[in-house]
Image (spheres, rainbow, N blue to C red):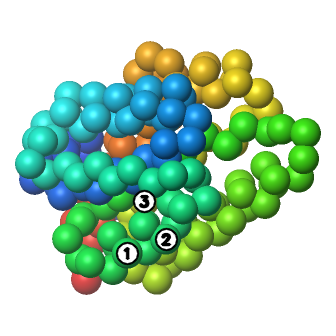
Amino acid sequence: MTKIIEGKLDARGIKLGIIVSRFNNFITEKLLDGALEGLKSHGGQDDDITVVRVPGAFEIPLLAERMAASGKYDALVCLGAVIRGDTPHFEYVSDAVTRGIGEAISRYRIPIGFGVLTTNNVEQAMERSGSKDANKGYEAALTAVEMINVIRQLPE
C-alpha cells in the first residue's frame, strides 16, 4: 500500500520566527496581520511566535540566517514588499532576497515561508496583502506550519 505523508495545518507547539520588513509598511503590516491570524486560527500561541522587524527586504536573509542558526525556531516566515520602480533596483533586491532565503533553507534545513511580495505596482501589492484568502502573509505562515508537520512525520 502506498504511504502518503501530508502536513497538517496545526500550529500548536510550533516555535515560529517572523521576519518583517518595515519598508512599504502599509503592505508589510497587512502581511504580518495575515501571518499572525493564520497561526492563531490554527492553534498557534503568542508565546511561540517571535516577530523581528528589519529596515527593508534586503535585510531579511541575514536575519533568516541568524534565526535559523540559533536552533530556537522550528520554522521561519519572511515578509516584505518589493515594488517595481523606474530603476533596476527591483531586480537586484528581489534576486538577493530570494537567493538569501533559499540559502538559509539549504544550510539550516529549516522551513521558511516565503511572503516577500515582488510586484509591478502598489495595486498588486495591495491585492496580495488583503483578506486571508488573498493574503500572502497568511499563506506563508501556513506553508511553514504544514512543512514542519510534514518533516515531523519523516524518519531522520
Three-letter amino acid code at disc 1?
Arg
Q: Earlier in the sequence, mark 2 or mark 3?
A: 2
122 sits left or right of 137 in the view: right
Which quadrant holds the C terminus? bottom left
Q: Quote the CA–CA distance across marks 2 and 3.
A: 13 Å
Q: Write down the quadrant of residue 92 in the picture.
A: bottom right
The secondary element bearing badge 1 is classed as helix
Residue 115, visible in the rendered structure: no
Residue 66: numbered disc: 1
Q: Residue at x 90, y 47 (%)?
A: 87
**Visible residue check, residue 104:** yes
Describe the element under mark 2 as helix, strand or loop.
Answer: helix
Structural distance between the alpha carbons of marks 3 and 1: 13 Å
Tell me how far mark 2 sits from mark 1, CA to CA.
6 Å
Query: Which quadrant: the N terminus?
Result: bottom left
Q: Quadrant of residue 91?
A: bottom right
**Mark 2 or 3, closer to the camera:** 2
Which residue: 23% across, 77% down?
Answer: 71
Residue 140 placement, left or right of 7 = right
Contact, mark 2 vs mark 1 (Cβ under 8 Å): yes
Amino acid type, residue under disc 2 in the picture: Leu
Disc 3 target residue: 112
Identify the residue at the far front of this view.
55
Q: Which residue is mark 2?
A: 62
Residue 130 at x, y percent in the picture: 50, 18
Disc 3, SS: strand
Q: Are circles 3 and 1 on residues that touch, CB within 8 Å?
A: no
